[in-house]
Amino acid sequence: MKEETPEIIFDRVTKSFPRTDGAGDAFDAIKDLSFEVRRGELLAILGRTGCGKSTTFNLISGLLRPTSGTVTVKGHDPFAQFDWFRGKIGIVFQNDRLMPWRTAFANVELGLELIKVEKHRRAEIVASWLARLGLKDRGGDFPHALSGGMRQRVSIARAFATRPDILLCDEPFSALDEHTGNVLREEFRGLLAETKATAIFITHSIEEALTLGGRLMVFARPARIAYETRLRADMTERDRDEVRTNIRRALAA
């Protein structure tokens, strides 16, 4: 049987930026980075501030072009073929990024409008996702009338509504209180399992990465893989402690 092509491929990718102070040459946010992500895989990326996590995120989403090397997503160049990915990639940010002039319903509907889903079908999909995320009766509310947790639920519903093949998540629960974050994290894991979407999850939290499960990578600066492991469902607490130690060691290097 032919092996399935990875959903995301980084092949010797470097991304350089000019220095804002004008001193010296450009600096590398990412240097010669290579990795692959299989379809349906959940990859959590940890790293200290400035290690290239967000740059990696932006290369996958097509917002940046690599200085050298190649980024391939679903067999396409996400920067050169940006429009092709409309509806195929969903993004959940640290802040909900809802449009304040649109209701919760209309915010979830936005992605469906962009990919030109028929109006009656959009209404069915939006109502379904709002109900699944506990917002059945809040669709007519504007963002200012919703709590932080509710707004992030709307953001998650918006990301899942188009049934994307890939989800990019940039610390989506870090601005929430611990209880709300834990609840949404569990719901998010369940939705990923159900939809079988491929997910890249950026986080600063070791415990969040361990809770999410799947595969874990620690970036060192400039973005390179300092540590990598796969988290098994049958891991003991001793196993998890060993992973925690390895992560802290990689972060401190």
Image: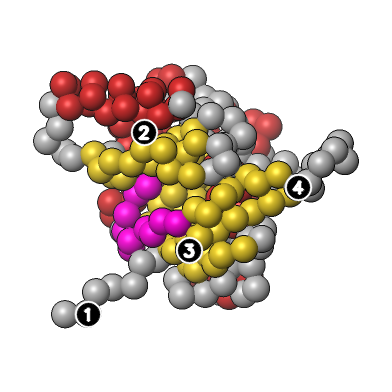
Q: Which of labels 2 and 4 is toward the front?
A: 4
Q: Against 181, is 12 above or below?
A: below
The image position of residue 7, as x and y in percent, is 39, 66
| Separation (CA) of disc 3 from disc 1 | 21 Å
Q: Earlier in the sequence, mark 1 or mark 4?
A: 1
Q: Which residue matches tag 1?
A: 2
Q: Which residue matches tag 3?
A: 11
Name the amino acid type tagged 3: Asp
Q: Against 75, is 185 above or below?
A: above
Q: Earlier in the sequence, mark 4 or mark 3?
A: 3
Q: Is residue 234 left or right of residue 63?
A: left
Q: Earlier in the sequence, mark 3 or mark 1?
A: 1
Q: What secondary structure is found at the residue carrying circle 1?
A: loop
Query: Which residue occupies the foreground of this view, 48 or 33?
Result: 33
Q: Quadrant of residue 235?
A: top left
Q: Which residue matches tag 4?
A: 26
Q: What secondary structure is found at the residue carrying circle 4?
A: loop
Q: Which of labels 1 and 4 is toward the front?
A: 4
Name the amino acid type tagged 4: Ala
Q: Which of labels 3 and 1 is toward the front?
A: 3
| Separation (CA) of disc 2 from disc 4 | 32 Å
Which residues fall within the magenta stretch? Answer: 34-44
Q: Which of labels 4 and 3 is toward the front?
A: 4
| Separation (CA) of disc 1 from disc 2 | 32 Å
Question: In the current view of this chain or complex, which residue is farthest to the bottom?
Answer: 1
Q: Which of labels 1 and 2 is toward the front?
A: 1
Q: What secondary structure is found at the residue carrying circle 3?
A: strand
Q: Which residue matches tag 2?
A: 209
Q: Residue 109, can we see it?
A: no
Name the amino acid type tagged 1: Lys
